[in-house]
Image (cartoon, coloured by chain):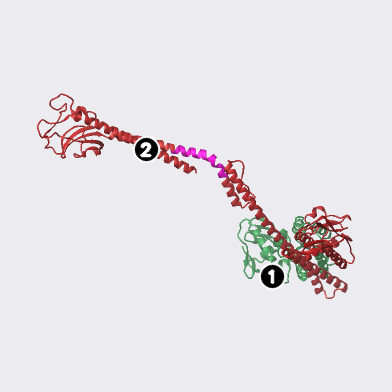
Amino acid sequence: MTAAATAAVALVLIAGGLLTVATFADRERSSLDRELERRAQGPAGRAVRPAPEPGSLEVAPGPDGPGGGGPGPRDLLAESGSFVRVVSDGQVLRAAGDVPDEGLPTRSDPGFATVDAGGGRWRILTIALELPPGFGSLSEPMIQFGADAGPLESRIDSMQRRVALISGLGIGLTVILASLLAGPALAPLSRLRRSVAGVSTTRDLSRRLPEGDAGREVDELAHGVNEMLARLESSSSETERALEATRRFAGDVGHEVRTPLTSMRANLDAVRRNPSMPEAERRAVLDDVAREQEDLVAVLDALQALARGDSAAALPREPVDMAEVIDSAVEAARRRHPGAHVELTAAEGEHMITGWPDGLRLLIDNLIENAIRHGGERVTVGLERDHGTLLLTVGDDGPGVPAREREHIFERFTRGAQAGSSPGSGLGLALVAQQAQMQGGDVTVGDSPAGGALFTVRLPGA
Amino acid sequence: MTTEPLVLVVDDDEEIRKALERALRLEGFAVRVADGGHAALELVEQERPGVMVLDVVMPDLSGISVVSRMRARGDDTPICILSARDEVEDRVAGLEAGADDYVVKPFDIGELAARLRALLRRMPAGDGAPIRVGDLLVDPARRSVQRAGRHVQLTRREFDLLEELARHRNVVLSRGQLLEGVWGYDFEVDGNVVDVFVGYLRRKLEADGETRMIHTVRGVGFVLRA
């Protein structure tokens, strides 16, 4: 931009200079030409007279010539650097003044001409002499008025030099001014360019361009780029989070499977390597192995249920009576854990919702199982309707969930500090959260009236 | 009177603690267990175990930190790290911090027991005569190493490996020979603990841009040359 402005100014200066020089030269030359014309019409011109004798031409004698009376051509052309000649048919008949030594043509067309002669430049005005009838044996008589064009040319030359110098200075000044003025004017754009380059080299999408310290157009540009960066950043960080979650999940699965495999292997080796192990110890080892195997199966079941849940959104939904599902789940839990007290308090009648029955059963099973494993002795399951929403609650009288753990307890493979290494896949509550979300509801954890944990699932009614 | 060597098993998983406690007891060890890093550091002080089995990933204090703290207070109880196959970085960090060996979960109890028994056997002290190979000076009596006048800080197992190589300078030693001579493993073992420690030694001996002294002889083993 700076370069373009400078080029434009240079072009104008050069064109103006050339025009000035051309105009000056033209005026100088035409003033010389007018001077030559004036002389041709003046005494010097008139001094050339047809001679009294026919067939000859007399040129008035100069001061050095014979006779006298009136100024001769030499006087008239006394100014240095000018001459007058009479030529005819290539022959110089008479000449006066400062005639160049050689190179002056003895034939020339009527009118003005510029010739190089005698080491200088001359301007010549040639006039054809019209001899009165009877005079004429002379062929093509011409009179040439010449003037030395040297001083004129040198004036034009010096004019050219001055114009060139002024133009050069002008261009130089333009460059300096342009960089001085354009610098501040373009600085915001330069900063913008550097900032954008910074974003692309560091690949740091959290960077933002400076806004509000430049002109309106530049600020709007920066704002637009910043909005684009923000969108890019959020979409790339979402992808990054998803990838990170997947990586963490794969690592967690590895750890959850490897740990029971390690203790199983140690137990199996103990039996293998000690054939004479006491029977009681042998039984204890095998019981441990069986339980570890069950844990592994539970982890696999939960993983598969989670994977099914991820793809279950596409399954057809149907009307489900939640009261019936809960009743069945509580019965099953009582059979699985004969020692546990599971109470059910449900409002009368049907509690229909539209959903995925297997998923809803999985949700309730996992909540009850979680309460029995990590809670206390009594588990209370409740179902009530709050306007259009179904509230499913599972409470216990155990230690509860500390406030700081509540946020993370629904994440996969998260175990509360209280749970320690108590049994479980670490996936049960993650399954609950997944199912609640799929049914269009949510799950939260708080304190139960009995002092333990209270899980509340809200499901939109039919 | 109990003469069984004492093993301290440190793991945050109860099932693993229980299984290892029983299996190692049946292998003839006396076993103590700790469920975390802090408990392990306390028990080491109290019980002075002959060898330690240490899980790397623990929530309260990692196995790496346990190794570092023990070595920092001058405790050179042999330590065998338990790690998953994909926890390479943790395992490497543990060995670099001064652990002696590692096994990958799940592992064979017979092999773990054999390794522990070998780690329990203290290497006989050197004969005291410093060994010079080129600009390398290995002093078994003071357990110090200098390369071109520069003191090189080595963990115990690194020193043992370098001493073994220096005693057999210009002789190619197989991985099996090094496992037997340095770790006391006269049985087939899983893993590449020799290669890992050779890597550490090279890095420390060439820290100032010195020339390589421990060379790999492909298909055979390693050799120390000036």
In this rendering, position of residue A303 left or right of residue A209: right
Q: Residue at x 47, y 39 (%)?
A: A175
Q: Amino acid at mark 2?
A: Leu
Q: Colour of chain A?
A: red
Q: Pointer 1: what residue?
A: B176
Q: Which chain can be seen in green?
A: B
- Magenta stretch in the rendered image: A171-191
Q: Nearer the viewer, residue B221 or A203?
A: A203
* In magenta stretch: residue A433: no
With respect to residue B15, does A154 lie above or below?
A: above
Q: In screen coordinates, is A200 left or right of A306? A: left
Q: Nearer the viewer, residue B202 or A441?
A: A441
- Which residue lies most toward the left here? A53
Q: Which residue is mark 2?
A: A19
Residue drawn at (49%, 39%), measured in percent from left and top? A178
Q: Quadrant of residue B194?
A: bottom right
Q: Element at badge 1? A: helix
Q: Are marks 1 and 2 in contact (CB under 8 Å)?
A: no
Q: Which subunit holds the residue at mark 2?
A: A
Q: Is residue A175 magenta?
A: yes
Residue B139 spot, x, y in % from top left: 69, 60
- Three-letter code, disc 1: Gly
Say which element carries label 2: helix
Q: CA distance from mark 1 to mark 2?
A: 98 Å
Find residue B179 and report its image quarter: bottom right
Percent position of residue A254, x then y: 73, 64
Magenta residues, dominant SS class: helix
Q: Chain letter for mark 1, please.
A: B
Question: Is B223 above or below relative to A448?
Answer: below
